[in-house]
Image (cartoon, grey):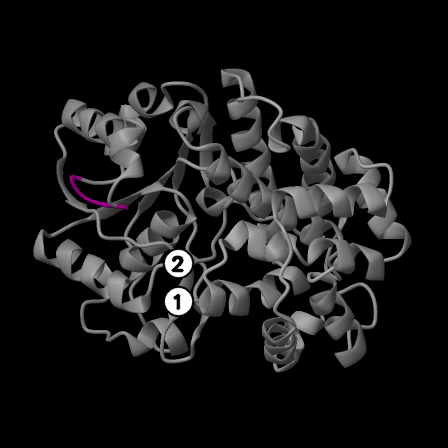
């Protein structure tokens, strides 16, 4: 068995200001990587700059990160970091800014490397700059994983860069979710659910990863009614959803993701379906293929049976009627033997196509 999670996590309200010294202790010149709107609207960016001001750090903001960030965006962020002499990086936002911040921390520390380095890896390189993460959504878990998923336009897909880059520090405050639209909360919570399910039903799962996945499923399952749209979340529920997302991140940090994530990339790239929904539509078919372990996952998450779970997914994530797109997703995944090997069942062309086409039901 193994467990590796080197990120120091603070999960509490006002944690960015409360732990300004830890944040400022990462360096003296910070590149802040974020998106164009949400981190400004929810107060996270103001909190980060106020914390840096308390410790005397200099900072520069790169706020051009798009949803599903591209290699090209990362290279622009790195150029900004190199230009201002950054010695650490802070990612503020959802999974897209956090993943972009990881890659930018690597490329800022390696100014002699071109964008091909993010695709191929393998060359000697300097360690990434120290990194802090301030999540503002409840799905990605990127604040506690070493994974950075980028869009590769040349390949017309998304994929993980060939490096593991864990933040040194994660500052998790549910307050930043308070003004988020329910569509964003639901979409990102579905991503957390996919992380928990895929880690629990992973071929490399062990006692330690199961500890995270199973406890996270129980915590996540307390919010089924909320995610159905029955009410707005309370502050305590937002804290809990963010905590479940971080626990889900810790789970996939040990095992990696599985078949639903592998199938999702074609849907996100070709049809612009939000990532959490694109993963979630494949979960019922994936669980059905997983037999008794799949039934345990449903019970842990608070569902009586696969029928109830399908109804929940269709209500929150919808379905994908484009069967040609679903076949494209399956064909793309079948070219990735390593992803097939993550399943606890015999994943082959027939089973993968069943899972893919189940998203249309």
- Total numbered badges shown on the rendered structure: 2
Residue 196 visible, this orientation? no
Query: Which stretch appears magenta?
Result: 28-35
Q: x and y percent of residue 241 in the render?
A: 56, 30
**Magenta-colored stretch includes residue 349:** no
Q: x and y percent of residue 192 in the render?
A: 59, 43
Position of 34 relative to 218 (above/below): below
Quarter location, residue 108: bottom left
**Magenta-colored stretch includes residue 33:** yes
- Give the residue at x 34% y 59%: 69
- Nearer to the camera, 213 or 26: 213
Quarter holding the C terminus is bottom right
User: Which residue in the structure is indicated by mark 1?
Assistant: 151
Which residue sits furthest left? Answer: 83
**Given contact means CB atoms under 8 Å apart, are the residues at marks 2 and 1 in contact?**
yes
Q: Mark 1 or mark 2, which is nearer the start of the sequence?
A: 2
- Give the residue at x 11% y 52%: 85
- The residue tagged with tag 1: helix, strand or loop? strand
Q: x and y percent of residue 176 in the render?
A: 38, 27
User: Which residue in the structure is indicated by mark 2?
Assistant: 68
- Nearer to the camera, 145 or 359: 359
Quarter location, residue 50: top left
Instruction: Measure the alpha-carbon separation of dots 2 and 1.
Output: 6 Å
- Nearer to the camera, 311 or 330: 311
Relative to 242, 355 lies left or right: right
Is disc 1 surrounded by few (<14), some (14 to 19) or many (20+) residues within 10 Å?
Answer: many
- The residue tagged with tag 2: helix, strand or loop? loop
């Amino acid at each position: 068995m193994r467990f590796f999670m080197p990120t120091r996590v603070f999960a509490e309200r006002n944690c960015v200001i409360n732990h300004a010294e830890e944040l400022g202790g990462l360096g003296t010149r910070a590149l802040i990587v974020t998106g164009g709107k949400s981190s400004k609207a929810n107060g996270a960016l103001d909190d980060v700059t106020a914390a840096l001001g308390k410790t005397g750090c200099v900072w520069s903001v790169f706020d051009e990160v798009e949803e599903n960030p591209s290699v090209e965006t990362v290279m622009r962020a790195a150029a900004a970091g190199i230009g201002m002499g950054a010695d650490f990086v802070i990612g503020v936002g959802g999974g897209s800014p956090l993943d972009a911040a990881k890659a930018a921390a690597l490329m800022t520390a390696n100014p002699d490397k071109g964008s091909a380095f993010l695709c191929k890896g393998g060359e000697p390189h300097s360690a990434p700059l120290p990194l802090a993460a301030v999540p503002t959504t409840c799905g990605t878990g990127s604040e506690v994983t070493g994974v950075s998923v980028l869009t590769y336009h040349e390949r017309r897909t998304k994929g993980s860069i060939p490096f593991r880059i864990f933040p040194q520090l994660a500052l998790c405050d549910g307050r930043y979710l308070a003004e988020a639209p329910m569509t964003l909360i639901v979409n990102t919570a579905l991503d957390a659910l996919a992380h928990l399910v895929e880690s629990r039903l992973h071929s490399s799962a062990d006692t330690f990863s199961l500890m995270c996945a199973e406890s996270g499923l129980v915590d996540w399952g307390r919010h089924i009614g909320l995610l159905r749209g029955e009410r707005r979340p309370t502050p305590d529920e937002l804290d809990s959803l963010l905590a479940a997302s971080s626990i889900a991140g810790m789970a996939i940090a040990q095992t990696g993701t599985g078949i639903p994530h592998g199938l999702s990339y074609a849907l996100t790239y070709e049809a612009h379906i939000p990532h959490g929904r694109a993963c979630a539509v494949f979960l019922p078919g994936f669980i059905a293929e997983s037999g008794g372990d799949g039934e345990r996952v449903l019970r842990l998450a608070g569902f009586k049976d696969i029928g109830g779970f399908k109804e929940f997914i269709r209500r929150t994530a919808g379905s994908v009627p484009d069967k040609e797109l679903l076949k494209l997703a399956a064909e793309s995944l079948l070219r990735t033997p390593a992803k097939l090997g993550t399943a606890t069942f015999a994943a082959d062309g027939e089973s993968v196509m069943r899972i893919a086409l189940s998203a249309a039901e």
